[in-house]
Amino acid sequence: MSRLKQGLVQLYTGNSKGKTTAAFGLAVRAVGHGFHVCIIQFMKGRDDYGELAGFKRLEPECCLEHFGTAGWVRKGQASDEDIREARRAWTRAVEVVMSGEWDIVVLDEVVNAIWFELLPEEEILHLLGQKPDRVEVVLTGRNASETLIAAADLVTEMVQIKHPYEKGIPAREGIEF
């Protein structure tokens, strides 16, 4: 039974850090209020992301399932395996959104999956139009189209002002991954 009276669509986009972090902060807050949250990660096949272990501590109220290959995807050069993994994630995402078992569903990096031509945007838009009224869906990823922006109820664009990478500081465990 959903705790939400009205589920909306949120979109976190932009070329800076913070999209996934914002969505995960929302997930933790929601679990603290008794909501059930499911996170489906697209294009994240590696097993060393800190959030995988962290969200296990919030089970069963929160689940995180990740899909993807371990390597990078290049636009226009996706492998069959990259596409298969994106399709597996998408199939699971549709099941989770439509099940009615989850109050909030985070589709982490789904916007990137569209941009890298792993999934057609029309399928995502169709799901957003068919989702149960009491399910909140959160989309993250760079390069959101005007169509996705128009379909969302809340849109936040992350804009980089300054980043430690510019000083040669690499991604740090527990902070960036």
Image: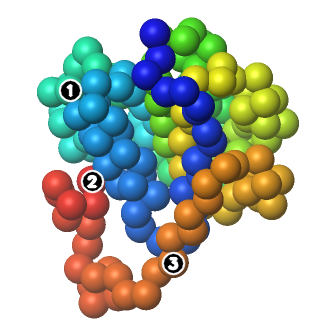
Say which residue appears at 63% left-offset and 14% top-offset: 98
**148 relative to 166 in the view: left or right:** right
- Disc 3 designates what residue? 159
Amino acid bearing label 2:
Phe
Nearer-N-terminus badge (1/2) = 1
Question: Vertical placement of 170 versus 87: above or below?
Answer: below
> Which of the pair 61/112 is nearer the observer?
61
**77 relative to 121 in the view: left or right:** left
For residue 177, which numbered disc appears in the image?
2
Amino acid bearing label 3:
Val
Question: Vertical placement of 1 versus 139: above or below?
Answer: above
The kind of secondary structure element at disc 2 is loop
User: What percent of the width, then of the height, locates residue 120?
Assistant: 80, 37
Report crowding for label 3: few under 14, some 14 to 19, many 20 or more residues within 10 A (C-alpha): few
User: What percent of the width, then of the height, locates residue 46?
Assistant: 35, 38
Residue 123 appears in the rendering: no
Query: What distance separates the C-alpha of mark 1 from that of mark 2?
Result: 18 Å
Q: Quadrant of residue 36?
A: top left
Report crowding for label 2: few under 14, some 14 to 19, many 20 or more residues within 10 A (C-alpha): few
The kind of secondary structure element at disc 3 is loop
